[in-house]
Image (cartoon, rainbow, N blue to C red):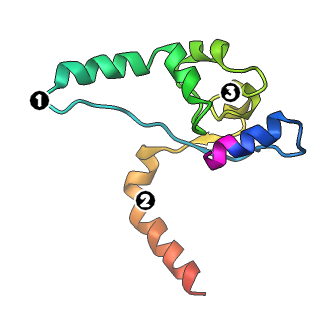
Amino acid sequence: MTPWTRSISFIMDGEPLGISYEGAALTFEAWVVPTGAPHAENAMKFINWALQPKPQAELTKYIAFGPTNKHAMQYVNPKLTPLLSSNPDNIKKGFILSGDWWGPNLDKVNEQWNEWKLK
């Protein structure tokens, strides 16, 4: 059992635990198939399947990622939806990390972070 499934099990069983997304840094990822990949067609088939609502909903039982396909929420256990990062109510509480900001500012932030750690 993963930490996510253990925590969710406790919460869904009525234990006084919760998850807060207040001030959460929201990110997203992407899947790509490199040019010339030997099994590109199968990789694209997998990506297409994985982005469908039902597989995304099923994944919420095992990992703490909320589905990116909005239509998946209808297949997620209703007790679980308030706990997911991609629940619309939770998205409103956080902010999206901006690559446009982090790219030019990463060195400065790292320098400040390292100075702070040494204090």
Residue bearing the label numbered 1: 38
Residue bearing the label numbered 3: 87
Location of the N terminus (image quadrant): top right
Q: Identify residue type, mark 2.
A: Asn
| Residue lying at 57% horizontally and 38% vertically, measured from the top left | 63
| Residue lying at 34% horizontally and 32% vertically, measured from the top left | 31
| Residue lying at 25% horizontally and 24% vertically, measured from the top left | 43
Disc 2/disc 1 C-alpha distance (Å) = 37 Å
Q: Secondary structure at mark 1?
A: loop
Residue 7 locus on image (x, y percent): 73, 45
Q: Nearer the viewer, mark 3 or mark 1?
A: 1
Disc 2/disc 3 C-alpha distance (Å) = 30 Å
Residue bearing the label numbered 2: 105
Judged left or right of residue 99, residue 68 is: right
Judged left or right of residue 79, residue 76 is: left
Give the prevailing secondary structure in the magenta stretch: helix
Q: Identify residue type, mark 3.
A: Asn
The image quarter containing residue 73 is: top right
Does the rendering let one see residue 21?
Answer: no
Q: Which residues are magenta?
A: 1-5
- Image height of 32 relative to 18, above or below: above
Does the rendering let one see residue 16?
Answer: yes
Q: Nearer the viewer, mark 2 or mark 3?
A: 3
Residue 21 locus on image (x, y percent): 72, 42
